[in-house]
Image (tube, helix red, strand yellow):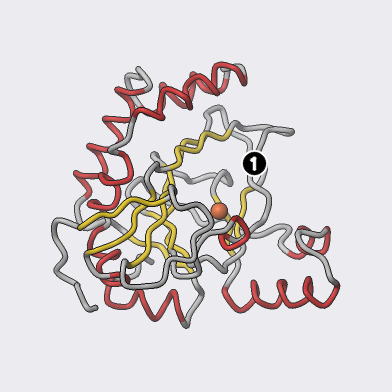
Amino acid sequence: MPVHPEQLPDELLFGAGYAVIRPRCHKKLERFRDQLLIETKAKSIDQLRYRLVSTSNAELNEIMLQLLSFTEASGMLAEAFSEHICALCGNEIFLQRRANVIMNLPGANQRHQWPHYELMSGISPSTYAIWLPLHDLLDDGGMFYITDKESFGVMQKEHDRGTVNSPYMFNSVLNQQVPKLEFGEALIFNPFVIHGNVEFNSVLARVAVSFRFQSRSDPLYQKNSDFFKTWVLESCESDSR
Ligand SMILES: [Fe+2]
């Protein structure tokens, strides 16, 4: 059930730590996807997904390199979700300079994201992330998330054991349910919730995108100073800060 912008701060700070949201303007999201298809020379998202299944790793890397020139991506996405971002951060934000386009192939032994939380890679503790598939995602090819409370429990156990990213952590999040999402729905999450994806079976690849942001009024504890750019959201009805 998508969370309303007004409920979002409570949900991310004191609730599960993650939530499903829908953009204020679906058309902006469609424009983003159309632009991505132009950049990848694909006629439709399913044609791109089909093509990716028979693509070599070298060709996949080539597509990823082509996408480096798609520098408007994170701004387009932030404007699509401006209502939720404003509710959390106000309209003046640090926005990830390059959105991550993530292409995952079906089947065993394909690369996928191990369980992790964003803070692990030097992301600021005030940063939120939005992840969304660029097509309906009704199989098990999505991302799983465990709640804030469960995530802290796993971290505490790791701390007690003196380990980081140990088999204990991997085993503690096995067999998680993956939320089914329609195109337009996204997962937003804080930097403490553990998430990852698993092998999936499908005739099509999964194409998703993620980007990160934080308020400009929060301290920037970010490892890499080139990671963000400044951004002022065009419309911000829910500006509560
Ligand atoms: Fe992540």
In the picture of the structure, the residue carrying the numbered disc 1 is 112
Q: Please provide percent x and percent y for residue 241.
A: 24, 78
Quadrant in the picture for residue 12: bottom left
Which is more toward the observer, 138 or 68? 68
Which is more toward the observer, 97 or 225? 225
Amino acid at circle 1: His
Q: Is mark 1 within 8 Å of ligand 1?
A: no
* Above or below: residue 72 compared with residue 93: above
* Above or below: residue 177 compared with residue 193: above
Report whether 145 appears left or right of 47.
right
Quadrant in the picture for residue 239: bottom left
Please give the name of the residue rendered at 57% of the width and 74% of the height, measured from the top-left corner. 148
Q: Please provide percent x and percent y for residue 185.
A: 36, 53
Report whether 131 appears left or right of 160.
left
At label 1, counting other C-alpha atoms closer than 10 Å, the crowd grade (few under 14, some 14-19, many 20 or more) is some
Which is more toward the observer, 119 or 219? 219
Which is more toward the observer, 175 or 31? 31
Q: Residue reaching furthest front?
A: 225
Please give the name of the residue rendered at 28% of the width and 65% of the height, measured from the top-left corner. 84
Please give the name of the residue rendered at 35% of the width and 61% of the height, measured from the top-left corner. 21
Q: Please provide percent x and percent y for residue 76.
A: 25, 44
Q: Residue reaching furthest right?
A: 161
* Above or below: residue 78 compared with residue 40: below
Q: Please provide percent x and percent y for residue 65.
A: 47, 24
Please give the name of the residue rendered at 39% of the width and 41% of the height, measured from the top-left corner. 98
* Above or below: residue 59 compared with residue 210: above
User: Regarding mark 1 in the picture, which secondary structure is present there?
Assistant: loop
Quarter of the image with the N terminus in it: bottom left
